[in-house]
Amino acid sequence: MRYELYYWPSIQGRGEFVRLALEDAGADYTDIARKPKGMAAMMRLMESRAIGQPPFAPPFLKSGKLVIAQTANILLYLAPRLDLVPMNEAGRVWAHQLQLTIADWVVEAHDTHHPISSGLYYDEQKAAAKRRAADFTANRIPKYLGYFDQILKRNVKGSEFLVGRNVSYVDLSLFQIIEGLRYAFPRAMARLEPKHPRATALRDRVAVRPQLAAYLSSERRIPFNQEGIFRHYPELDG
């Protein structure tokens, strides 16, 4: 199966969670908007009346005649096909639950720099952003890291991953959010990560997976920047 991924071409954003799964699995896919005239193709497909269940926004995935939107939903569809989730129902539902928790974490990370409105510039909500980021680094990052650390601690003996004994898409997503938080809040993460060693160790195991490591060192991996979910403003890094 050849997949088509539709997402903004200049940021990692939510689309990166899907890219990581596709890249780690060595899947055959095209990142449409990064191709010549790709943005126009993405917008045409979004607006097409031929899609009976149109996406609200990117990312979305085209697989045959299916068009699937929402990051967690795309991963729910892809994972069994890419061998990135247990095949039993309990394992798939548990992985989806964890991915939805990561989705909540991603929203909170984004809202540190846009706490009032996505339609306002950062400079127009700086005071609120400082308050929001202070709570995020002091309370919310430790809560999320602690949750995933405890899951790894309580897992079946011999498992080094979040769901079952093999890597899943949730492990890749935890890797991505830790990477993003290291970029956005380097001082806070340097302080917090030693308190949650299992989550950090999982990040390290994922980073050296051959297919993923090749992707991370390639030009296909878009660098973090000040337009994506994870943005580095030194004044927010408490």
Image (cartoon, grey):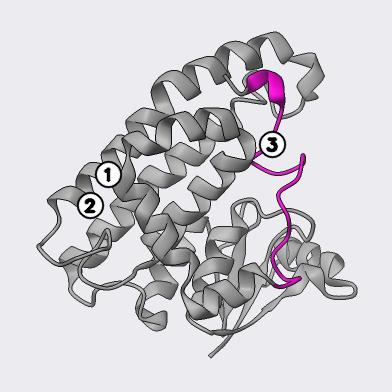
Which contiguous range is marked in magenta?
218-236
What kind of element bears circle 1? helix
Query: Mark 1 vs mark 3: which is more N-terminal?
Result: 1
Q: Name which residue lies at 24% across and 73% down.
A: 86
What kind of element bears circle 3? loop
The Cα atoms of the two marked residues, 3 and 2, are separated by 28 Å
Give above or below for 154 relative to 51: above
Q: Quadrant of residue 231?
A: top right
Q: Main secondary structure of the magenta part?
A: loop
Which residue appears farthest toward the left when viewing the image? Answer: 157
Look at label 3 and name its amino acid.
Arg
Query: Mark 3 vs mark 2: which is more N-terminal?
Result: 2
Whether residues under marks 1 and 3 lie with C-beta atoms below 8 angstroms apart, the answer is no
- Badge 2 is on which residue? 152
- What is the x, y in percent for residue 127? 69, 8
Look at label 1 and name its amino acid.
Asp
The nearer-to-camera label among 1 and 3 is 1
Depth order, front residue of 198/164: 198
225 in the magenta segment:
yes
Determine crowd level at label 1: few under 14, some 14-19, many 20+ residues with C-alpha closer than 10 A: many
Q: Which numbered tag is attached to residue 229?
A: none
Look at label 2 and name its amino acid.
Leu
Q: Name which residue lies at 70% across and 66% down.
A: 49
The Cα atoms of the two marked residues, 1 and 2, are separated by 5 Å
84 in the magenta segment:
no
Q: Which numbered tag is attached to residue 149?
A: 1
- Badge 3 is on which residue? 231
What kind of element bears circle 2? helix
